[in-house]
Image: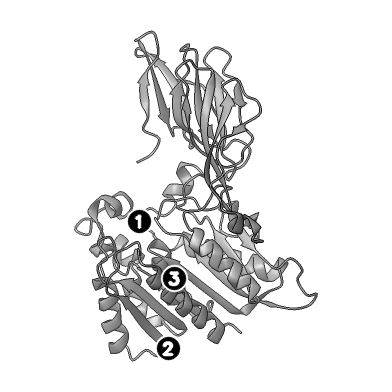
Amino acid sequence: WGFNDFGWMADGRTLWLLSEESGYSHLYTQAGSARPQALTSGKWETSAPVLSADGKGFYFLCNQQAPHDYEVCAVDTGSRQVRELTSLNGVEDFSLSPDGQQLLVRYSAAYLPAQLAVVPSAGGQARVLTDTRTAEYKAREWIQPKLVAVPSKHGAGVVWAKYYEPEHKEPGKKYPIVMFVHGAGYLQNVHQRYPAYFREQMFHNLLVQKGYIVLDMDYRGSEGYGRDWRTAIYRNMGHPELEDYKDGLDWLVDTQQGDREHAGIYGGSYGGFMTFMALFRSPGTFKAGAALRPVLDWQNYNHAYTSNILNTPDIDPEAYRTSSPIEYAQNLQDNLLIAHGMMDDNVFFQDSVHLTQRLIELHKDNWSIAPYPLERHGYVRADSWLDQYKRILKLFEQNLK
């Protein structure tokens, strides 16, 4: 649903458009029926293009230097030279001033919620306008996530991840592992912006303080890495992603003193689905998992999302069987926590009820379910968030140490 922007150039005859024809979203112009001409190119993504005030170029978001580094870039239609105009690392969006001389930029960082700055449209020093953090918040010492490239053993090149660790690890000590799986199916969480999962980032600080190391990966299917990365899960959801997490586990064990025998996994929505796939399809790999508001059977999920990835159950039932955790539930042997809002209008609570009955019939042990009667897909009550994360922490403390 992204990279569909298009419009007219100042001459009223030339069309500009975004296309993933090269495998990455880039900006093109097309005059009449002539072939489109690329204004940007490379293994990075162009998004949110805005025509310059003089009509001779464009401003746009780019992650030219690294998939996780978002800046405002500009390109002239004549020279086709791309220039980075900002050096803020975590630009979220921008607006061009009416006279075309300035850019109002919204940017953020790992522990910096979105703020505003003004930058000359030709590039230059940013003038910061806002800082909404309290003194108490700024006084806290947060663990900065390290952006790491995990080697893939499954043909994916590298998988970018956020890694949280103690400032000083003890030589020779093995550390219990927690792996986090972001949700939304198509979303990027490994970037230098303020994360949508800011609560989980704080929880990762707590986990490190309690002696864990934590890895949060942009598995195949995540946004920000081009067309082929996104479509790698077509008709096969939960399989390439699990390979990526097992590669991440290997990386932690081989290079970061991770303890393979004491590894856990958790996540919500798509992350909950992936927690199921990890425990059901690779039993013994993760000793404990917390599946939050999780998808169990893609036949129960909304048509607009699943039909783009799995087609529809009537014409492609095999894709649904391959991709739905309910088909593998008999393999559960590790410790599982299910947490789900009973009013969830995205992933229906019936999925967790269905799995509850299935696990009873399978005579499975070491699992539990925490229903939240007043919550939908995104919790709104602080006590629900607190209760859920206390349960996740207890699950890991009891099974990973």
Q: Amino acid at mark 3?
A: Thr
In the rendered view, tell whether residue 128 sits above or below residue 306: above
In the rendered view, tell whether residue 364 sits above or below residue 145: below
Q: Quadrant of the N terminus?
A: top left
Residue 87, image x, y percentages: 64, 35
Q: Amino acid at mark 2?
A: Asn
Residue 134, image x, y percentages: 56, 53
Disc 3 to disc 2, C-alpha distance:
15 Å
Q: Amino acid at mark 1?
A: Arg
| Residue density around tag 2, few if under 14, some if 14–19, many if 20 or more, within 10 Å | few
Disc 3 to disc 1, C-alpha distance:
19 Å
Q: Residue furthest right?
A: 171
Which residue matches tag 3? 275
The secondary element bearing badge 2 is classed as loop
| Residue density around tag 1, few if under 14, some if 14–19, many if 20 or more, within 10 Å | many
Which residue matches tag 2? 366
Q: Earlier in the sequence, mark 1 or mark 2?
A: 1
Residue 188, image x, y percentages: 49, 50
Which residue matches tag 1? 235
Disc 1 to disc 2, C-alpha distance:
31 Å
